[in-house]
Amino acid sequence: MANIHQVAKQAGVSIATVSRVLNNTSKVSEKTRHKVEKAIRELNYAPSMLGRNLRNSESRLLLVLIHTFSNPYYTEIINGIEDYAIENNYNILLCETDDNLQREDIFLHMVRNKLADGIISMNPTVHVDKLKELSESHSIVLCSDYYEDANIPYIAIDNTEAAYRAVKYLITMGNKKIGLINFNENLLYAKQRRIGFEKALNEFQLPICDEWIHYTDGLSFQDGVEAMRRMLRSKNRPTAVFIISDTLAIGAIKELHAQGIKVPQEMAIIGFDNIAFSSMTTPALTTVSQPKYQMGYRSAKMVIDRIQGLPVENVIMDYELIIRESTLG
Amino acid sequence: MANIHQVAKQAGVSIATVSRVLNNTSKVSEKTRHKVEKAIRELNYAPSMLGRNLRNSESRLLLVLIHTFSNPYYTEIINGIEDYAIENNYNILLCETDDNLQREDIFLHMVRNKLADGIISMNPTVHVDKLKELSESHSIVLCSDYYEDANIPYIAIDNTEAAYRAVKYLITMGNKKIGLINFNENLLYAKQRRIGFEKALNEFQLPICDEWIHYTDGLSFQDGVEAMRRMLRSKNRPTAVFIISDTLAIGAIKELHAQGIKVPQEMAIIGFDNIAFSSMTTPALTTVSQPKYQMGYRSAKMVIDRIQGLPVENVIMDYELIIRESTLG
DNA sequence: AGTTCTGATGTAAACGTTTTCTGTAAGCTA
DNA sequence: TAGCTTACAGAAAACGTTTACATCAGAACT
């Protein structure tokens, strides 16, 4: 593959001129511009990003840290990130950390190694201290989950409020016995959603019953199945359950089906996240929708702004309650 | 951020020695090694990949071309690719082409620009000619869909045979009227699966009825809903349908549900791909499973082997029929 | 004509590595 | 001790760009 020197030679100009034509960074006469363009075509030349990146000391690569590819919650966010990134000549590297601290380290190192210019972390299990330290010298943004005191820019929704609204909806539909399936409260959003849940129940003076509250170890379908199975062991059952994530909710519904309990007639279910599949299940899932695409798009903007030294501010986005079949009736 | 010169100075050695310690590429005495390591720690030094990549003229980045993130078929393949890549010190860049030729061009250019060392393409709508040309000088591998005469290494299953087996299973379960929902036959696999479908029917002298064969424009849930809706317009209905992809099949089942037709009692459904969600639906989907993780893992090996100039050969993987609820009874 | 200015182009340094080639001191053999 | 090998370390070139600075021809002044 030809390099800039060969193009310069072929065109009878200096490499500086070729570079100027490539980047049209300063005026080049029409005549020489044509000569250079001709040479580029003849040699089928494409500038090496390796050289350019070294010289500019940038990689134009953004890291996107996620827990696992198989979580469909991320897909739309990633679409948003990617669109903004591509528009601004960045590429994104999807990094699956898989709860593996070593793997996470590899990715965090990449930004120190100049292999990436910034990080969007959606990985709630990330090692906070390291991230915090890195954030002092590099561009890092948290998307959808964040740390209250870490001083790392973030974008998220008001989880407490959203959960409150969802549960309030269940109450206004006449439910008096409402359960919760939640995930590990190390994650801020899990804690916030539980608080919102309790806030709604308290407001209407409804009982918060331990038998109706179950925690899961993961966010998978199977975790949802098992949580619901545990809940159903008790004779005293809630008439509606607020579930922290759609995938868990879909698992829960599957278990209800298996035990012959009708959704929503015998038990209403409300999920969270509005993943693509939540509209495809039978019954289709009522859920809280986050503006995932926009969250991705804007977090990409935040991280790139920060790379360029611009000031960034935390963003709280709006959510929306999507009512489908799993709570009707 | 410190560079290698500062480390060398701090340690009182030359940059060559520092580099040797970094890569332990040749013997360095214990004493100097310690000096260097101390300096590295003191300066909190991390070698720049930009410099290293330029010098080695490699990026250690692999491009993975997919059509859209939201297709869950890819997730496990990507897991496999990533595992092999990480093991071999490569990173992968997920590239969503979205049927956008311009976007695809950007990605193909990246390998010419040295920003990526190789490509794994799972994007069936890719511009074949360009890929073919690029493949002559660069490392490209096709995964799961391929082109018969393009001379680009590929990894796939025997789609004809797999479809044949699936349909034969429907026949042995007593079905005599069997339908097909297929996708655009520009894709080799769609054509192959249709051929397998016909082969099975012919073998058992069952009718191939146009009323029972429907094509979709896409691979989404909604496309599945609509295809089934069209099929149900006819009074004369099949008792089983072979559907080219799980997402379509899940859409079809949703429509059957909506029209009050029981699956599998009134109509059996068999899908293809064994995506994660296919086990979560009600009824859970019978489907043909491809060894997706292995396909990803091995295609990463193929592309890296090719980068290193090793010879590679096309691979045909085994498939498996996964029997679940949508065909029982 | 001499001076100044302008616009286009060239020169060379810099980005941060790896690696070949060379040098040198120490260790060994005879 | 002379001669040879070995083990280690340094100097410098190379990878392919971008860009600050220098140069230079010609235009536009006085």
Image (cartoon, coloured by chain):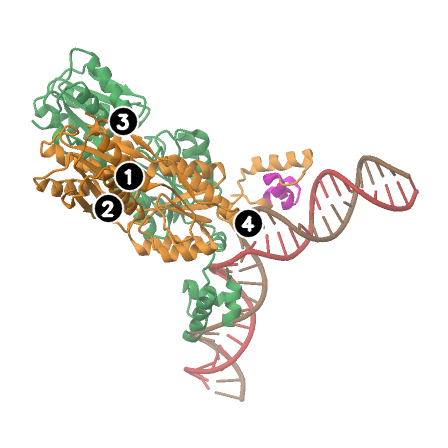
Chain colours: A green, B orange, C brown, D red
Residue B56: image tag: 4
| Label 2: few (<14), some (14–19) or many (≥20) C-alpha neighbours in 10 Å | many
Q: Are discs 3 and 4 both within one chain?
A: no
Q: Secondary structure at mark 2?
A: strand
Mark 2 to mark 3 CA distance (whole Å): 29 Å
Q: Quadrant of residue A141?
A: top left
- The correct choice, above or below, for A216 with respect to A134 in the image is above
- The correct choice, above or below, for A200 with respect to B94 in the image is above
Protein chain holding label 2: B
Q: Residue at x 9, y 23 (%)?
A: A265
Answer with mark 1 or mark 2, whichever residue precedes in sequence.
1
Residue A73 percent location from the top left of the image = 27, 35
Q: Give amino acid for label 1.
A: Ala
Q: Give amino acid for label 2.
A: Phe
In front of the other: label 2 or label 3? 2
Helix, strand or loop: magenta stretch: helix
Protein chain holding label 4: B
Whether residue B23 appears in magenta in the rendering, the answer is: yes
Mark 4 to mark 1 CA distance (whole Å): 46 Å
Residue A27: image tag: none
Q: Residue at x 35, y 47 (%)?
A: A305
Answer with mark 2 or mark 4, whichever residue precedes in sequence.
4
Is residue B172 found left or right of A186 in the rendered image? left
Mark 2 to mark 4 CA distance (whole Å): 44 Å
Mark 3 to mark 4 CA distance (whole Å): 45 Å
